[in-house]
Image: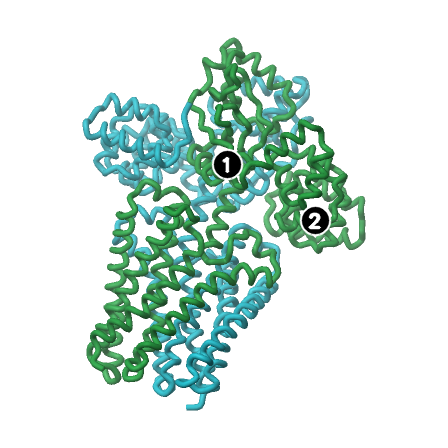
Chain colours: A green, B cyan
Amino acid sequence: MKKEMFEHEISLLRDTFRRLLNRKANINLLKLVEKTHPADLAVIYRFFTDFEQDYLFKLMDDTAYGAEFLSELDESILEDLLEEVSPERLVPIIREASSDDQKTILDALPDEKAQAIIDSLHVDEQEEIEEMLAYPEDSAGSMMSRDVFTLSEELTAGEAIKDLQNQEGAEMVFYLYVTNNQNQLVGVISLRDLATTKSSTKLNAMMIKNVQYVRAETDQEEVAKIVSRYNLLAVPVVDSNDEILGIVTVDDVVDVIREEATEDFLQMAGAGKDREILMKSSWGNAKSRLPWLFASWIGGVVAISIIGYFETMLQSIVVLAAFIPVIIGMGGNIGTQSSTIIVRGLATGRIDLGSDLKLILKELSVGLILGSLYGLLLGILAFFFFKEEAPAMFGIVVGLSICASMVLATSIGTVVPLLLRKLEIDPAIATGPFVTTTIDILGVGIYFLIASALLPL
Amino acid sequence: MKKEMFEHEISLLRDTFRRLLNRKANINLLKLVEKTHPADLAVIYRFFTDFEQDYLFKLMDDTAYGAEFLSELDESILEDLLEEVSPERLVPIIREASSDDQKTILDALPDEKAQAIIDSLHVDEQEEIEEMLAYPEDSAGSMMSRDVFTLSEELTAGEAIKDLQNQEGAEMVFYLYVTNNQNQLVGVISLRDLATTKSSTKLNAMMIKNVQYVRAETDQEEVAKIVSRYNLLAVPVVDSNDEILGIVTVDDVVDVIREEATEDFLQMAGAGKDREILMKSSWGNAKSRLPWLFASWIGGVVAISIIGYFETMLQSIVVLAAFIPVIIGMGGNIGTQSSTIIVRGLATGRIDLGSDLKLILKELSVGLILGSLYGLLLGILAFFFFKEEAPAMFGIVVGLSICASMVLATSIGTVVPLLLRKLEIDPAIATGPFVTTTIDILGVGIYFLIASALLPL
C-alpha cells in the first residue's frame, strides 16, 4: 500500500529517476514510470533538465499514462517538452485523452502542429475538438468533459442499470443526468439511488428535478462557486436549448480554485498573473514585475515634487522629514489590510449582497479608530521628543496627519477594488502597489498641508 | 429546473424572505425554506437581523434540512443562532447530521450545552462523537466522515453489489474500500468497475492495491494537497494499524482550499486570520488589525530616530527629504512582490523541492535587474532636476540607494517566509507589514549612510 506522498518521498523518487537517467537504464526507468503516479511525475519534471525531460518522455510507451501525465504538467514545461515531439507521437495520446486534457495539450502546441494533429483524426473527432477549442478561455465549455452519460426519463431503474453497465466511455460517473425526448436536461439521479430503488420505477418518478447547471460560456470562477457552494461532484453544462453538452468535474474545480487564488495573490502584489512565475528566468520574472513598479516609481516622483514644493518649510523645520516614513508607512499598511479584506471578500462571494456604502463606512470607521489611536501615540511622542527643535504645534500636526493618512488609506483600499469590480476589471489587479502609491502621494501631501496650515514659518 | 444561483437571484430570494418575515407568514416561509437550498439560505442569513435569524430557525421543522443548513452557516452566525436554541431542539439534528457536521455544530456551542446534548445520546453515539471531538483542530480526523462503507476482499463483485444495495448509512459512496480479515485497508474499487466486472470475480482480484490514504492527525492542508494532486473524490483516513476510521470527501477539501487561501491573504496583509472579519463590528475588526500596525508603528519610530540622527546633513541638503518616499516605496513594493511569490509558492507546494539558496539568488538577481533600472531612472532625474540645490553626486546617491533598497527588499521578502517555514511558523504571518516595515528602516538607513559617505557636508 502506498504511503502518503509527502515532499520527502517525492524527492527520493526524483533522485532515483536521476540516477537511472544518468545510467540510461531504460528498462528500469520504464518500470519506475509505471509505478509512479502521473501527477507525481509531473511534479518531479519541474526539477529535471531539458535533456532529462525529453529523454524520459521519449521512453514512455503507454498512451493512457502519457495523456494523463501531459495534462498534469505545468504549462511552461508542457510547451517546452512538446516542441521536440512529432505530431505522429501525439495523435494516439490525443485520442486517448479526455476532452479537457485534449484542450490542454493542443493549446500548448504551436498552431500548425495542433492543426496537423487535428487533421489526422477522424472527422467526428475533429468536429468535437474544434468545437471545444472555440469556447472562450476559462469558460465552462473549455474545461468540461464531453464524456457524459445521459439516460432517458422514460427508462426504468432496472433498464438504466443495464445501460450503465454497457457504457465504456464515461470514465467518471458521479451523477446520472436524465433527459426528455427533446434531449433536454430534466433531472438528475445519484448512482446510489438508482441501485437502491425498485427496478421497475421510472426515472422521472425518482429523479431530482432541481438540477444545478451552467452554460458553456459561464466563467470558470462562477462554475467553481456553484460547485463549492452546493457541494457538487460535477455540474452539467447545457446549451441555450437546455441540451447537455458535457460536465465539469470537481477535480478540475479544485484546480481552478487554487489557480484563481494564486493569480489573485500575484496580481494584488503587482507581480503579474502568471502562476508559473517561479519557473521563469530572472529576466522573465523581472519583466512581469516591472510595470507595476513603474507605477510606484511615478508615484515616487510625484511625492518628490510635493515635498520639493514645501522646501522652505522643511528648511526651517527639518524634523518634518523624519516623520515621512511613518506617516506613509502606517497609511500603506492599513490601506493594504482594507484592500486585501475587500478583494478576498469579493473573490469568495461574501461581499456580493452587502451594500458598498455600508462597507466603505465601516472601513472608514476602522480607519478612524486606529488612526486616532496611532495618531495620538505618535503625536505625543513627537511633542515630547522634539520639544526643542519644533514648534509646540508639531505634535498636533503629526497626530492629525497620521490619522488623516490612515482614514484616507482605508477608504482608498476599500473603494478601489469595489470600483474595479463595477468597471468589470479584476479587483485584484495591482491593488497593492496602487493603494500604497496613492497613500504615498496623498499622505505626504496632507502632512505638508497640515504642517503649513498649523506651523508658524 | 433551477437556474444558476447568481448574486441577483440570491438577493431576490433574500427580499422575498424578508417580506414574508415582516408579515410573519409562517406557512409561506416554510414553503420557501423547503424550496431553498440550505447553502443558499446560509448565505442569505448573513443579511438577516438577529431577530429574523432566530425567528426563521425556530420555524424550521425538518431536522435533515436543519442539520445541513447549520453546517453551512458562517461560524459567527452559527454561534449567535445556537445561543437561543435549547439542547432538546438540537438532539435530533445532531443525530441526523453527518459526523463532520456534528463536530461543526457542537464546536459552536458552549461546552455545557454541547455536553448536555452528547449526554442525551445513546452510549455508542456518545463514544463516536467524543472520539471525534478529541482529534486536533484542522486535522483529517476532525473533518472526516465516519460513514464509510467497506467490503471484505473475499467477496465477489456480485455479493458486493448486493451488500451495497442494502446499505443505508453511507450517504456519499465514491469509492469502495476493501479490507482484509484484520480489517486493514488493502484496496479500492470504483463503483463503475464493480458494476461492469463479471459478478463472480473476487474483489481482491479486481481492486487497486495502491491506495492513497491519510492519518487521523494529518493536517487538513496536507489532505487538500493529496486530494487535489491525485484528483481524488475522497481519501480514506486510517489509524496506525491501517484500520479505516473514515473518509474525507472532496467537498470538504474544496472548503479547506478556499479557507486556507483566505487566511493566507489576511495574514499576509497583517489583518489577523479570521476569515469572517467582514462580519465583525468596526471595533472587532480594528482589534484584529491593531497588532500588526503596531509593528509598523515601531518601525516608523526607528526610522524617525535614524533620520533625526542625520539632521545636520538634512539641514544642509534639504532635497534629500524629497526622495525618502520613493526609496522606501519602491523597496516596499518589490519586497512585497517577492514575499507574495514565495508565500504562495510554499502554499501550493511549488517550492517544496527547490533549494532555498537558488531561490534567494534568483530573487536577488531580479532585485539587481530592477534596482539598477529604476535606480538609473531616478538617479538621472535627481541629477538634472536638482542640479542647483544639491551637490553633483546627489544623482549617484539616489540611484545607488534605490538599487540597494530594492536588492535588500527582494532578499528580505524571500528570506523571511522561508525562515518562518523552517521555524514551523506559518510563512504568511504578517509577511506584508513585516517586510515593508523592515524596508522602511533599512531603506532610510542605507540612503542616509550613502549620502553621508558621498556628499560633501
Q: Is residue B37 above or below residue A107?
A: above
Q: Are both tags, 1 and 2, on one chain? A: no
Could you tell me which residue is drawn at 26 percent across and 51 percent down? Answer: A362
> In 3D space, how far apart are the residues under numbered discs 1 and 2 (Cα atoms)?
31 Å
Res B93 quadrant in image = top left
Where's residue B396, x and y in %? 50, 81
A162 w.r.t. B224: above or below: above
What's the chain of the residue with tag 1?
B
Above or below for B429 versus B57: below
**Type of amino acid under label 1:** Val
Q: Nearer the viewer, residue B167 or A216?
A: A216
Q: Which class describes the residues within 10 Å of circle 1: few (<14), some (14-19), or many (20+)?
A: many
In the displayed structure, A238 sits above or below A452; it is above
Determine the residue located farthest toward the top in the rendered image: A200
Q: Are marks 1 and 2 in contact (CB under 8 Å)?
A: no
Element at label 1: helix
Q: Nearer the viewer, mark 1 or mark 2?
A: 2
Chain to which mark 2 belongs: A
Q: Position of residue A134 (x, y in %)?
A: 58, 36
Residue carrying label 1:
B250
Q: Left or right: where does residue B155 sit relative to residue A214? A: right
Q: Quadrant of the N terminus of chain B?
A: top left
Residue B280 in sight:
yes
Q: Is residue A375 left or right of residue B324?
A: left
Can I make out residue B181 in this image? no
- Residue closest to the eye, A259 or A218: A218
Closer-to-camera residue (A63/A91): A91
Q: Where residue A210 appears, x then y in whole percent?
A: 42, 23
